[in-house]
Amino acid sequence: MNPVPRRRRGGRSRWVTVVCGAVFAVASGVAMSLGPVLPAVAADYDRDTGLATFDETWRIVQETYYDTTFGGLDWTAMRDRYRPRAEAAGDNGSLRGVVREMLARLGDSHFALIEGSAADARDRAARRDRSGDAGLEVRLVNGEPMVTRVEPDRGAAKAGVRAGWTVRAIDGVPVEEILGRVPTGLSSSNTELEELLELWRALLGAPGSEAMLLLRDETGEETLYKAARTPSPGELFRLGALPAFRSHLQVSVAPTPAGHRAAVFRYNVWTLPIIRGLDQAVDTLRTVDGWVFDLRGNLGGIAQMVMGISGHILDEPLSLGSIVSRKNKLELRANPRRVSAGGERVTPFAGPVAILVDQLTYSASELFAAGLQDLGRARVFGVTTLGGVLAASFTRLPNGDLLEHPVADYLTPSGIRVEGRGVIPDAIVPPDRARLLEGRDPVLEEALHWIEEESTP
């Protein structure tokens, strides 16, 4: 959705973009912080601007938060409690700590402060290039970081890294220290999300650099591996004043045990470049036995995109659920795709559909999975998602920071609230270290086995 100009008090304009995802905060490397208030005043800090920033944040939530009861929290009392601390703040970092602590009291996802102006963000990115990665994914298994995916022909694979190994340190920093960067006071789901994002950020670096990975194998032996970082794959994408990031789509055909064929669509974000690529890919895969949407690690994006993608597998404009704000209700209805990208008449795919989810399936991806699961059109495999599906807006604050704030809730077609609950898979498939060590993908295997059963007369 394009930025929509609005007006606010005092005649100053602001821009708002409604999205459903954490990917933009991820791209900027922002985590919630409950930092201390420092008495000293920084030379470049203006107290009046800082206090205006606090007041504007409180007002925005007061006027746009989707729940007028604030979950039972006295929001006026929160202003009275935190405003003296904001007034005493001596720099922007301390002010942000006060604001973030106040926002955290609401206990919802999709609250974030993105520091500084877009120009500042670009300057920081130029000073420290983190556009490369070594081609591996890490998830928390029983609280321990484990490699769950190694991309073929990327740095980690060439270095000999295997899925199923656990991570002890990244670039000389112990994982305990990396995870310790996450502040206390967050909800359990937000804490888990921030821990995973801290690990993800630690793996990034400049293309051409080496990720120094201290890994523990299945025998308990620890070995240091040097994995070359290469440019992250995909197409550069930018939304408004937010930092640019890369969206990428992988399409493949996987065999089931008995030789049936399933298309596998794996993508990391819901954006227009992804949708265009997927629209073209499905035209060559309409005759396979099943489809798999692999949304593991997909942190969300533009929620409206799910209506077009669901139209490839729904032949009626069924509701995928509703996004409900204070005054409005947006029904997310599938847009049946009866014309191919090439202009030919087609019918939506009618075969079995599986959706794969994990700890980093978030926001718009949860909405897609929950809606189709609720309709009985797809079967979900993996582990319960984090439950962060609120639609959010972005507003520029007086000190130049960008505030992400939720403006609407999501309910499935049958009225189930997913925020804080997550999408509960039909088939719970936790990470299986033994199968990972064998180079297998337990979640995909279960989905392919189900597609085979559904495709066999």
Image (tube, helix red, strand yellow):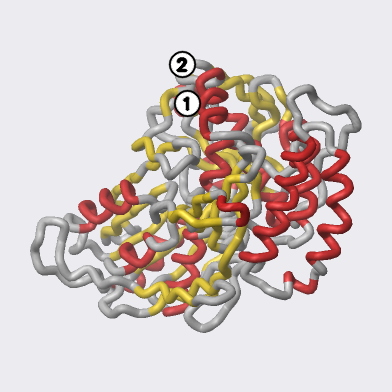
Foreground: 17 or 383? Answer: 17
Foreground: 53 or 455? Answer: 53
Q: Residue at 65%, 33% (x, y): give it.
A: 167
Q: Secondary structure at mark 2?
A: loop
Would residue 270 be found to the left or right of residue 174 on screen? Answer: left
Q: Secondary structure at mark 1?
A: strand
Q: Residues within 10 Å of mark 1 (few under 14, many from 20)?
A: many
Q: Residue at 37%, 42% (x, y): give it.
A: 248
Numbered mark located on residue 58 in the image: none
Report whether residue 167 is seen.
yes
Report whether residue 361 is seen.
no
Contact between labelled residues 2 and 1, with CB atoms less than 8 Å apart: yes
Outermost residue toward the right in this view? 39
Q: Residue at 69%, 59% (x, y): give it.
A: 59
The quarter in which the N terminus is drawn is: bottom left
Foreground: 216 or 31? Answer: 31
Q: Quadrant of residue 30?
A: top right
Circle 2: residue type = Gly
The quarter in which the C terminus is drawn is: bottom left
Q: Which residue is mark 2?
A: 208
Return the x and y of residue 376 as percentages of the image width and height. Answer: 42, 79
Residue 432, above or below 147 = below
Q: Which residue is mark 1?
A: 132
Q: Residues within 10 Å of mark 2 (few under 14, many from 20)?
A: some
Would residue 40 be found to the left or right of residue 374 on screen? Answer: right
Circle 1: residue type = Gly
Which of the marked residues, 1 or 2, is nearer the chain's N terminus?
1
Foreground: 147 or 83? Answer: 83
Would residue 377 be found to the left or right of residue 205 on screen? Answer: left
Q: Quadrant of residue 91?
A: top right
